[in-house]
Image (cartoon, helix red, strand yellow):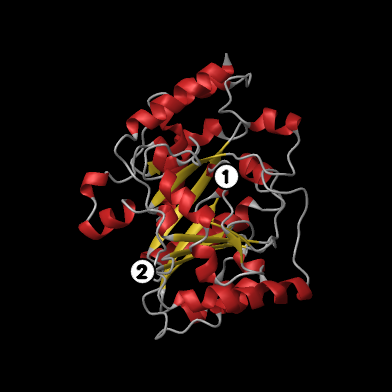
Amino acid sequence: MHVADDEERRKVLLEKNKGRVCPTPFLRFDVWRDGRVAVCCTDWMQGDVIIGNVFEQGWNEIWNSETAKRIRKSVTDGSFSHCTEKCPWLADARLPLREGLSEEERAIADNPEADLKHPPEFIKLVNDDSCNLSCPSCRHEVFVENNSNSEEIFEANMQVVYPMLKNAKVLDILGNGEALASKATMKLLNTLDARTHRNLTIDLLTNATHFNANAWERLKNVHPLNLRLNISADGATKETYEKLRRGGKWEAFNANLEFIGNLRRENKISLLTINFTVQADNYRELPLIGDFARRYNADRVLLFRLMRWPHMSDEYFAHVDIFSSSHPLHQDFLTTVKGFSDPMVEIGPLSMFV
């Protein structure tokens, strides 16, 4: 029954994306802790999606690998065979229509297996697990890379990533950890130059637990660049926040959000986003998250579906995956989200349920 439901949802997903293409695999370069590289969020993908390794290859060899070309073909032929419904761009049918592409873009989309001459425009670092929190959705305990590992990560950043940054448009950090807790990431940021990298936008993902005036001073090297902050919240009340952001303190978090909100008001950061990963313990706070974000001058809230990370047991994931039709609270979840609408909130994975 559930398999049939999944197959039907897949058909609906592909039908509403008919005629659309995804530009991401032609633009994006994600670097993981073990050196693996992907061209999109691997939590939203399926099958063989690793295109190379920064500890073994240069960026051009990775960028034009056979796997990279196969993925690019799948997002231009309508099959989206490496993509899943967890992708919010597919879920919301927000991908561009082929007919709306420029002549140059269409030429690339029509020949997806050719070598790309341009380097990636969007570089995402997911290569340091260091974090001061131990959120249940992410890990069992606090972890910080030792000095030797941090140096290894930094060297790979300098040899493979840094040469691409001169022509890149966006550097996104740090997808699987806390940027302010990562020695390698902070060291990389301190190599950036306002003249050399004047066209570079920094997307900084942070839990904001230590993002105060002292942290802002540590980031002074990127103040002249276009800086956008993404804050992981996952709760709009003290009880939920401290349960899901284990180790975080609600009062300190809100004080730092006040500081960050002032930076946004003064245009010292150009975009402030609140991230909210929807799960069994917080879905009832969806009606609250928009006003919570407005309180701190945020520009938007992005909703995400909780992914199954390697540390999760079958029992734990079954307990938290409220999107599953077999979850005992799934019907209540559907009732809660039905008709949900807030101009501040981009509903993403909820679009198939609203």
Q: CA distance from mark 1 to mark 2?
A: 33 Å
> What's the amino acid at mark 2?
Asn
Give the farthest residue toward the top.
Answer: 1
Residue 259 seen in the figure: no
Residue 140 in view: yes
Q: Residue at x 48, y 49 (%)?
A: 70
Q: Of 219 and 138, which appears nearest the observer?
A: 138
Q: Residue 265: x and y, percent?
A: 37, 64
Q: Examine the image and state in which quarter residue 53 appears.
A: bottom right
Residue 209 or 163: which is nearer the viewer?
163
Q: Is residue 36 above or below residue 239?
A: below
- What residue sits 58% from the left and 57% below the top? 175
Disc 2 packing (10 Å; few <14; some 14–19; many ≥20): few
| Image quadrant occupied by the N terminus | top right
Q: Is the residue marked by circle 1 packed among few (<14), some (14-19), or many (20+) residues within 10 Å?
A: some
Q: Are marks 1 and 2 in contact (CB under 8 Å)?
A: no
Q: Where, by quadrant of the figure, is residue 277 drawn?
A: top right
* Image coords of residue 41 (percent x, y): 53, 50
Report the disc number at residue 267.
2
Q: Which mark is residue 43?
A: 1
Q: Position of residue 338 (x, y in %)?
A: 42, 23
Question: Circle 2 sits in a helix, a strand or a loop, which is it?
Answer: loop
**Residue kind at label 1, given as amino acid type:** Asp
Tell me where residue 13 appears, x and y as whole percent.
40, 30
Q: Secondary structure at mark 1?
A: helix
Q: Quadrant of the C terminus?
A: top left
Give residue 342's mark.
none
Above/below status of 317 relative to 242: above
The answer to whether residue 113 is left or right of residue 148 is left
Instruction: Of the two numbered discs 1 and 2 on the same chain, state the one appearing first in sequence.
Output: 1
